[in-house]
Image (cartoon, grey):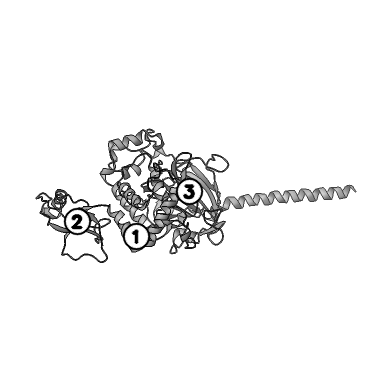
């Protein structure tokens, strides 16, 4: 195969499909290698590109018809300057200059918060483009938490121009179409982390020697199974015994669905809304509707009225497979692709970028859910939430509508970084948190299968009410008896 002297090199952003980016360049290369019986459309094609010094692009003749609304990649001396996902942002800004102005303002505000060039290297738009080129194929290291939070920190700065637009927060990462581009970036980053280039023995040793990842505890499958970063990150347990299930035969006990830190409980009102006091928005009380979390087409969007919501935060260092917190039958299942945002702050003490795991952002985030019918305790919603570059929410193949699962069974996995997990309980469940407390306001980190809470259930509550009634009747009887006794003595 011989490349023509003048071609338009084009690239689909993710897999086969419509070509959206192209650049006119030159180069010659040839190869007669390939896979029979049609080598010239397989390996030979790629080898000829490599011989010509053209990588990551497919070629079409310059006279070929280009797809509608393609954008040309700027080149310098025949070389493509930026990665395709960065070029997509550049093209977006060219079409919508307001996005560029808001991005520059957000970068400037991030610089005001942390002016240190060493820990905040992106302080201009051009530096942001270079940063994206580096980040999309950056080899993972043990500082992944701060790395991915920095990505969001740069575009999480409050902008007055975005107030009153119905966003969760007036920052650029929640504002379409920039938020859509962020999701595309997460996909591009994830695609690289699915390649063998993203993993090596050297990278493995870094994580093995960091005790936060627990690789020395004998919990996980053989490292020989990990050929890519995502295979490591979504690693399996060596045996189910690595995460024993609390009270496996007691359906009232709710176990932790993930290695995580519980964040608390929020009441759901009669209109299926939760109120977040002193939230990060301008108003003191911000209301979020369960319908927004499950989707307007969910037949269970109003099933949790007067119930409870609880959620837990997964650190990037945690085991990132999630399990059934309760047993029962799957009634509904869905994955919703939305934002890949994360509220992030600069921690001046640790000099790291940390996630702010509040409540509310999950309602517009990439997420999945299953509704589980537990029988006596009603419906429970299990909702894994993607966070920042963790946009990949996946369910096991055997998790389908109508399938029956035991408490502790595998539910699915996250990829790429840190995450969140929400659970919804109906009023009839009578759910109470029992997770161990760190102090008066915080919970301790717990593992999959450890006790998270208990469902007292309607029968237990009726029984409790019955005994209160009996006790109250006895008290009234004794009071009346005392009064009668006094009257008789007179």
389, 311: nearer the viewer: 389
- Please state which of the two labelled residues, at mark 1 or mark 2, is closer to the viewer: 1
Real-space Cα distance between discs 2 and 3? 42 Å
Under tag 3, what secondary structure?
Answer: loop
Q: In this rendering, does residue 299 appear at all? A: yes
Real-space Cα distance between discs 3 and 1? 30 Å
* Vertical comparison of 355 with 283: above or below: above
Under tag 2, what secondary structure?
Answer: strand
Where's residue 377, x and y in %? 51, 53
Badge 1 crowding class, 10 Å Cα cut-off, few under 14, some 14 to 19, many 20 or more, is some
On residue 58, the disc is: 2
- Please state which of the two labelled residues, at mark 3 or mark 1, is closer to the viewer: 1
Residue that numbered label 3 is attached to: 357
At 40% from the left and 40% from the top, the residue drawn is 317
Badge 3 crowding class, 10 Å Cα cut-off, few under 14, some 14 to 19, many 20 or more, is some
76, 32: nearer the viewer: 76
Q: Which of the two discs, 3 and 1, labels the residue nearer the N terminus? A: 1
Residue that numbered label 1 is attached to: 93
Q: In this rendering, does residue 337 appear at all? A: no
Real-space Cα distance between discs 1 and 2? 25 Å
Q: Which of the two discs, 2 and 3, labels the residue nearer the N terminus? A: 2
Q: Are marks 2 and 3 in contact (CB under 8 Å)?
A: no
Badge 2 crowding class, 10 Å Cα cut-off, few under 14, some 14 to 19, many 20 or more, is some
- In the image, taking residue 377 as reference, residue 399 lies left or right, namely left
Where's residue 74, x and y in %? 25, 57
Q: Are marks 3 and 1 in contact (CB under 8 Å)?
A: no
């Amino acid at each position: 195969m011989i490349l023509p002297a003048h071609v338009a090199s084009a690239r689909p952003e993710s897999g086969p499909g419509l070509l959206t980016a192209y650049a006119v360049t030159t180069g010659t290369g040839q190869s007669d290698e390939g896979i029979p019986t049609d080598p010239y459309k397989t390996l030979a094609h790629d080898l000829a590109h490599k011989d010509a010094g053209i990588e990551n692009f497919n070629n079409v003749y310059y006279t070929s018809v280009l797809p509608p609304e393609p954008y040309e990649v700027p080149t310098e001396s025949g070389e493509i300057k930026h990665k395709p996902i960065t070029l997509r942002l550049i093209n977006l800004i060219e079409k919508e200059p307001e996005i560029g102005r808001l991005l520059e303002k957000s970068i400037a505000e991030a610089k005001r918060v942390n002016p240190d060039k060493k820990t905040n290297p992106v302080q201009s738009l051009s530096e942001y483009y270079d940063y994206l080129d580096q980040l999309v194929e950056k080899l993972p290291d043990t500082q992944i938490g701060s790395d991915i939070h920095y990505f969001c920190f740069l575009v999480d700065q409050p902008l007055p121009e975005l107030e009153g637009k119905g966003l969760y927060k007036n920052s650029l990462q929640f504002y379409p179409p920039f938020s859509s581009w962020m999701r595309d970036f997460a996909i591009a980053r994830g695609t690289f982390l699915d390649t063998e280039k993203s993993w090596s023995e050297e990278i493995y040793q870094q994580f093995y020697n960091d005790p936060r990842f627990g690789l020395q505890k004998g919990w996980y499958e053989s490292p020989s199974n990990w050929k890519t970063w995502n295979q490591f990150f979504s690693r399996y347990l060596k045996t189910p015994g690595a995460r024993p299930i609390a009270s496996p035969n007691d359906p009232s006990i709710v176990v932790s669905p993930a290695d995580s830190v519980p964040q608390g409980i929020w009441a759901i009102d009669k209109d299926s809304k939760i109120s977040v006091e002193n939230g990060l928005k301008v108003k003191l009380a911000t209301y979020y509707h369960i319908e927004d979390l499950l989707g307007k087409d969910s037949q269970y969007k109003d099933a949790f009225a007067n119930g409870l919501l609880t959620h837990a935060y997964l650190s990037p260092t945690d085991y990132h497979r999630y399990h059934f917190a309760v047993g029962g039958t799957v009634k509904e299942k869905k994955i919703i692709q939305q934002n890949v945002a994360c509220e992030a702050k600069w921690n001046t003490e640790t000099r790291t970028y940390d996630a702010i795991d509040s409540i509310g952002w999950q309602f517009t985030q990439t997420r999945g859910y299953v509704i589980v019918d537990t029988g006596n305790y009603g419906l429970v919603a299990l909702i894994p939430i993607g966070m920042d570059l963790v946009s990949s929410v996946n369910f096991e193949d055997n998790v389908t509508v109508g399938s029956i699962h035991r408490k502790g069974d595998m539910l699915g996995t996250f990829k790429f970084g840190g995450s969140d997990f929400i659970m919804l309980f109906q009023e009839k469940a009578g759910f109470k948190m029992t997770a161990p407390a760190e102090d008066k306001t915080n919970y301790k980190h717990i593992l999959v299968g450890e006790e998270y809470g208990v469902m007292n259930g309607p029968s237990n509550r009726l029984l409790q009410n019955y005994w209160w009634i009996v006790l109250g009747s006895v008290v009234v009887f004794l009071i009346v008896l005392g009064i009668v006794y006094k009257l008789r003595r007179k």
